[in-house]
Amino acid sequence: MAPGELAVGIDIGGTNSVFGFVDRKGKILASGSIRTASFPRFENFVSVLYKEIIKTGNKSCKGLKIRGFGIGAPMGNINKGTIEHSAGLPWKGIVPLSDVFHRHTDLPVIVTNDANAAAVGEMIYGGAKGMKNFVVITLGTGLGSGFVADGRLLYGHTGFAGELGHTSLKPESSDRECGCGKKGCLETYVSATGLKRTLVKILADSMKPSRLRKYSFEELDSKIIYEAARKGDPLALLAFEKTGRILGYKLADVVAHTNPEAIFLFGGLARAGEMLFRPVRESMEENMLSIYRGKVKILGSKLNLQNAAVLGASSLVWSTC
């Protein structure tokens, strides 16, 4: 690897797409963004994004060489370089991301889903340095997951291995609809959205006082629930307890599948700290096979949350090229 080389990390989100020029140590030298939602035509989006990247690089990173482009996106497929049927983006169906990007550059372009990018980022820049077996769970609007086993990120036959958020928690009895079209998916319970839905049910079923009763469903979000829990609101605390125990229950199965050294919780919901981590640990240990008990760490991500998506995407370049 030549000195002065940089990777460009790109995080494609439903509202904004963020990019950054990242060195091998994980330092972001320059960054920028464009509004994803402003481009109904995918080709126009890529053209404007690439021009913005080059403009930023020419201004802030002169004399440094771009090694390649790593792109994290919802439902990104590393095998095909595509985004496939993502509900959160303005382009429907199968989007040929890598092919369109290569109209502008001959450099490597690596595409994967955002949770896999986070897992590679954790391995290269974060708390999983030196680990060969670990899992990253991303807790945002939904629940994503990336699995590393024996030092390799698991992609599976079609490139979509590890969709833990869309495994069924209560496939027949649950009335919680998921954006994927199924009912009872884990992310309908364990995510920022799931926490809110759990809290609303608790409020309906309980007569206990709570400062959260003054909010409408539209006004409530995970940050408001967190602040109430931090101040001791019993129903907000119960919502975190239930959310953590559900996640721990499912992670006991994850441990049986992949036998990881650690499971990293990543994303906005993980900022709740021990309000979430404690019930996760307790429930996982209770539900695990005895041979695994006391051997799996539940850890917070060591990536800076503000830059994590870009760092994770950029790390695809260093791990692949």
Image (tube, grey):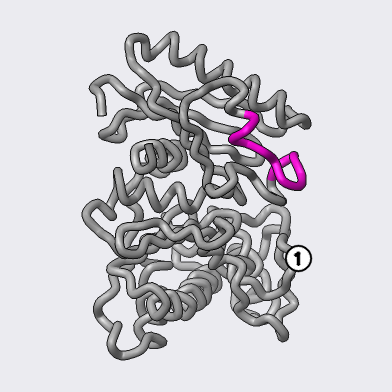
Q: Is residue 123 above or below residue 2?
A: below
Q: Quadrant of the N terminus?
A: top left
Location of the C terminus by quadrant is top left
Q: Is residue 319 above or below residue 277?
A: above
Residue located 47% across and 26% down the image:
107
Q: The residue tagged with tag 1: helix, strand or loop?
A: loop
The magenta segment is 89-100
x and y percent of residue 248 in the render?
44, 76
- Drawn side of residue 182 relative to residue 310, left or right: right
Residue 99 colored magenta?
yes
Q: Residues within 10 Å of mark 1 (few under 14, many from 20)?
A: few
On screen, residue 131 versus residue 75, left or right, reads left
Amino acid at circle 1: Gly
Q: Residue at x 48, y 64 (%)?
A: 229
Does residue 195 show up magenta in the picture? no
**Which residue is identified by label 1?**
181
Q: Is residue 283 visible?
A: yes
Q: Residue 121 in the image: state x and y as whole percent.
A: 37, 46
Quarter of image, res 90: top right
